[in-house]
Amino acid sequence: MSSELYSKIYNFLVTANQEHITATSVIYQGIEEDHWISQNDLRRVVDQAIGFASNLYAEEPSRQLKLLRILPQFEIAFKGVCSLRDIGAVKMNKERPLNSDEIKKNINELKAKLKKNITTPINQHLYFGINNMNISELSWMNPLASQVISDESEIVKKLPGQFKHTFMKPVQQMVPSLLPSAVKRKCNEFVATFIENREIDLSRKLIHDGIWKETENELAIIAERILDTLSDSWNNPAFGANFVESLNEGNEVTQDLKTEDFGF
């Protein structure tokens, strides 16, 4: 049982206005904390919280009655809150976990991609590694379920030495082998001259003067890179048509251009 979930529900039961305590409001507290908790797991938490909260209000029969009405109405209230969550009426900050059919579909698509270039030795090892997996035991939290072959996955760890090195080479190339001496010198100067708690006119330093810091040619190159990144993201198989259609493309591109790379 999650202690955070129990604490949230218990605190709601003992501090909320009596008229706000219903099966629906209590279940909403639980689903807001753990979006995809099962009905039985949430019921156990609520049952325990109600037991302790009832003892606290032994001298208030009307509030106790409110608490005792929650469990008989739990099942229908749980279905109601979940339906609101599923249609988007209740906003959640986490995506819905993949179900078994979606995981199976993603794994089959990943295998098909590897099979297109099966003559490559590393692709052969990855393909057969995935093919020998028990998909029914694959959790939605595993990156493979979303067609992502992570360097932490078992199939990568089991690659022969030279193939594992090949798989990790792009990551290794992203890390410079040496830090430039000029950067080291600047870091040393900062440590040597740093004055703690010195007064700084932040209001002046944080105000933008509204002037582009790059040349027009540099801005065009940056814009092209941003759009290339967006193109790669929108063409990623992990994002289906429904996801792409939900984007307001004009606002998305404009906002990226204005705020991410141009200093505004």
Image: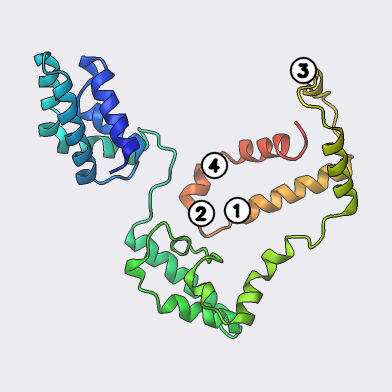
Q: Name the residue under label 2.
A: 239
| Residue 20 appears in view | yes
Residue receiving disc 3:
203
Residue highlighted by disc 4:
247
**Residue 229: % across, % down:** 67, 52
Tag 4's secondary structure? loop
* 2 or 1: tag closer to the N-terminus: 1
In front: label 4 or label 2:
2
Around disc 1, counting alpha carbons within 10 Å, would you say few (fewer than 14), some (14 to 19), or many (20 or more)?
few
* Residues at marks 1 and 3, CA–CA distance in whole angstroms: 37 Å
Residue 87 is at least partly visible in this image: no
Residue 95 is situated, as x and y percent measured from the top left of the image, at 42, 46
Per the image, label 2 sits on a secondary structure element best described as loop
- Mark 3 to mark 4 CA distance (whole Å): 35 Å
How far apart are the two marked residues, 1 and 4, measured between alpha carbons?
A: 12 Å
Query: Relative to the observer, which residue lies in front, 135 or 42?
Result: 42
Quadrant assignment, res 103 = bottom left
SS label for mark 1: helix
The residue carrying mark 1 is 233
- State if disc 1 and disc 2 touch (CB < 8 Å): yes
Quarter placement of the N terminus: top left
Image side of residue 119 versus residue 219, left or right: left
